[in-house]
Amino acid sequence: QVQLVESGGGLVQPGGSLRLSCAASGIVFSIYTMTWYRQAPGKQRELVATITSGANTNYANYADSVKGRFTISRDNAKNTVYLQMNSLKPEDTAVYYCNAWMKNDVLLSYWGQGTQVTVSS
């Protein structure tokens, strides 16, 4: 059974930092591309950051709105992907979701349950 479990969300003041974690089980973690998405109330889910699969070099991409503030990383030994969020703004408030996907003969995609991030004074 595949599970993605996010943690690390919470309430933080503008300018503050949070680190989200997503622990995966039931998959060969290293071969999956890992992505963080977020969904704010009344808005569509949007891609925040993604990191490629692989045991050695991984490449990251970011939404323009978070470039320079957020950093995605992965620890294949711990089956975990992280999202370090700095200089948080009220507009970063959303539920953050972890996604794992890979394509071989078929596309496999799994989602976590989400973790709430609220940026407010």
Image: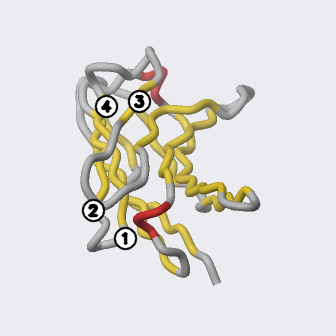
Q: Residues within 10 Å of mark 1 (few under 14, many from 20)?
A: some
Return the disc, 3 or 1, that comes first in the chain's sequence: 3
Indicate the colouring scheme: secondary structure
Location of residue 120 in the rendering, given as x and y in whole percent from the top left corner: 39, 29
Q: Name the amino acid type tagged 1.
A: Asn
- Disc 2, disc 3: CB below 8 Å? no
Q: Secondary structure at mark 1?
A: loop
Q: Which mark is residue 61?
A: 3
Distance CA(mark 2)–CA(mark 3) = 17 Å
Location of residue 62 in the rendering, given as x and y in whole percent from the top left corner: 42, 27
In this view of the protein, which residue sits in the foreground, 20 or 111? 111
- Counting every numbered tag in the picture gives 4
In this view of the protein, which residue sits in the foreground, 10 or 46? 46
- Disc 1, disc 4: CB below 8 Å? no
Q: Which mark is residue 79?
A: 1
Location of residue 97 in the rendering, given as x and y in whole percent from the top left corner: 56, 49
Q: Which mark is residue 9?
A: none
Q: Secondary structure at mark 3?
A: strand
Distance CA(mark 2)–CA(mark 4) = 17 Å
Q: Name the amino acid type tagged 4.
A: Phe
Return the disc, 2 or 3, that comes first in the chain's sequence: 3
Q: Name the amino acid type tagged 3.
A: Asn
Q: Is residue 105 above or below residue 39?
A: below
Distance CA(mark 4)–CA(mark 3) = 10 Å
Return the disc, 1 or 4, that comes first in the chain's sequence: 4
2 sits to left or right of 116: right
Residue at which label 2 appears: 75
Residue drawn at 50 percent across, 59 percent down: 32
Return the disc, 2 or 4, that comes first in the chain's sequence: 4
The quadrant holding residue 90 is top left
Return the disc, 4 or 3, that comes first in the chain's sequence: 3
